[in-house]
Image (cartoon, rainbow, N blue to C red):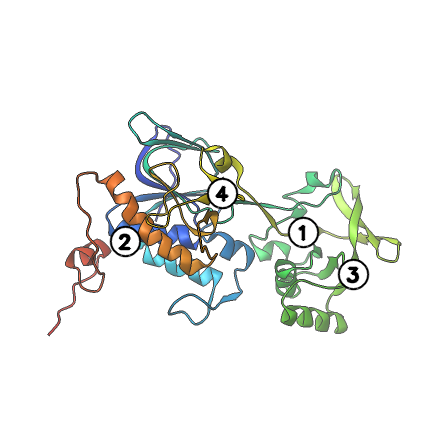
Amino acid sequence: METDNKNQQPIEADAVIVGAGPVGLFQVFELGLLEIKAHVIDSLPFVGGQCVELYPDKPIYDIPAAPSITGVELAENLMKQIEPFKPTFHLGQEVIKVERREDERFDVETSTGTKFIAKTVFIAAGVGAFQPRTLPVDGIDRFEGSQLFYRVKDPEAFRGKNLVICGGGDSALDWTLKLVDIAESVILLHRREEYRAAPASVSKMKALCEDFQMQALTGQVTGFEEKDGKLAEIKVSGLDGVTRRIPLDTLLVFFGLSPKLGPIADWGLEIDRRQIVVDTERFMTNIPGIFAVGDINIYPGKKKLILSGFHEAALAAFGAAPFVFPKKRVHLQYTTTSPKLHKVLGVESPVFD
C-alpha cells in the first residue's frame, strides 16, 4: 500500500475512489483486474468505513463464503486482496471539489490540498462523510481531544482513568465493556433506561453493575465544572429532576454518527433523497465518467447490502474501462483460468491435467 505524499502538483490518475469502506476497497480490486490503478480518498483516518467505525467487532453474516466476519476482519481481508494493485491512500481528508475539465477528465481536490486530474471518479462514500454527533453543552468543546472524545483510537490511553461514557447504543456499550478492565472506574450515562445496544451487551453491562465493577446512570449532561483549566466534573440532570455532579478524568461520548453528503451535493449529480441516481448497466451517474457504488447510490430495486455494492463495483469497473482505455477492447476474463489475470495478481497459473 502506498500512502499520500501530499504532492503539490496535481496527481494524474486513471481512477479516484471517494470512500475506503468495503465497497470502495473492492472497487480497487475490480479496477485492478482491468489494469486500472486507483487512488482512494477517505475522510476517516483509517480504511474500513462504516464497518470499522460503527461495529468493528460485531459479526457480519451475509458476506459470501464468510459465515461470520467482523468489520475489522473484512477490511483486513480486502486490504490483503488488493495488495497486488498497490493503490495509493489519501486518508483523513475530504473531497471538496470535482469539476469536469475541457479534456473530459476531472479536477479533484481534497480538504488538505491534494489535487488530482482523474479520468474517472468512483463515489463509494457509504451514506456520506460521517461526523460524530457532539455533546450539546456550551463551552465543553474546548476539552475535545484532551479529555472529551467522540472516538477511541487507543484504549490504552484511558488506562487508570476515571471515565464517564455517554450513550446507549452499540458503540457506547462495546467500549464500556472493553474499558471496564482498563480504566480506574467507568460510569455509563444514558438519557433513557432502555438501551439500543445488543441485548447480550446490555446484560453483560448490568451484570458488571451488580458486581460493583461499574455504574450505570440515567440522565443527561447539562453542564460542567473546570479546575486549573481542566474538566473536573460534569453536571447530570436525572429523570428525577435532581442534578448531580460527577467527578471525572475523561468523558467519552457515543451519540452516533451523522452522515452528511457534504460537498458531494454540489457536484452537479442527480440526487434523490440524499442518494446519487445511477443506471444499472454501469452504475454511472448523470455525469459521464463519474460512478457511484454502495449505499450512496439509488436505483429501482436498490438494496443496501455490502454484497450488492460488490456487484455494483464489478460492473462499474467495466463501465469505466472505455474512459481509461478508449481504444482498447475489454473482455470478461475469469481469475480461475486467465493467465493474464494471474500475471496481474502475481500468482502462478495452475496446470490442469
Q: Which element is circle 2 on?
A: helix
Q: Which element is circle 1 on?
A: strand
Q: Is residue 139 above or below residue 24?
A: above
Report the residue marked by disc 3.
217
Percent x, y of residue 120:
33, 39
Q: Do the residues labelled 1 and 2 touch (CB within 8 Å)?
A: no
Q: CA gap, disc 1 to disc 2? A: 39 Å
Q: Label 1: how many residues lie within 10 Å, few (<14), some (14-19) or many (20+)?
A: many
Q: What residue type is labelled 2?
A: Pro
Q: Which mark is residue 84?
A: 2
- N-terminal of the pair, mark 3 or mark 1, is 3
Q: Label 4: how many residues lie within 10 Å, few (<14), some (14-19) or many (20+)?
A: many
Task: Tell me the quarter of the picture where residue 80 sits.
Answer: bottom left
Percent x, y of residue 332:
21, 55
Q: CA gap, disc 1 to disc 4? A: 20 Å
Q: Which element is circle 3 on?
A: strand
Q: In this view, does 352 lie to the left or right of 65?
A: left
Task: Tell me the quarter of the picture where residue 5 sits.
Answer: top left
Q: Nearer the viewer, residue 196 or 234?
A: 196
- N-terminal of the pair, mark 3 or mark 4, is 4
Q: Residue 253 carries which label?
A: 1
Percent x, y of residue 274:
53, 43
Report the residue marked by disc 4.
43
Q: Label 2: how many residues lie within 10 Å, few (<14), some (14-19) or many (20+)?
A: some
Quarter of the figure that contains the C terminus: bottom left
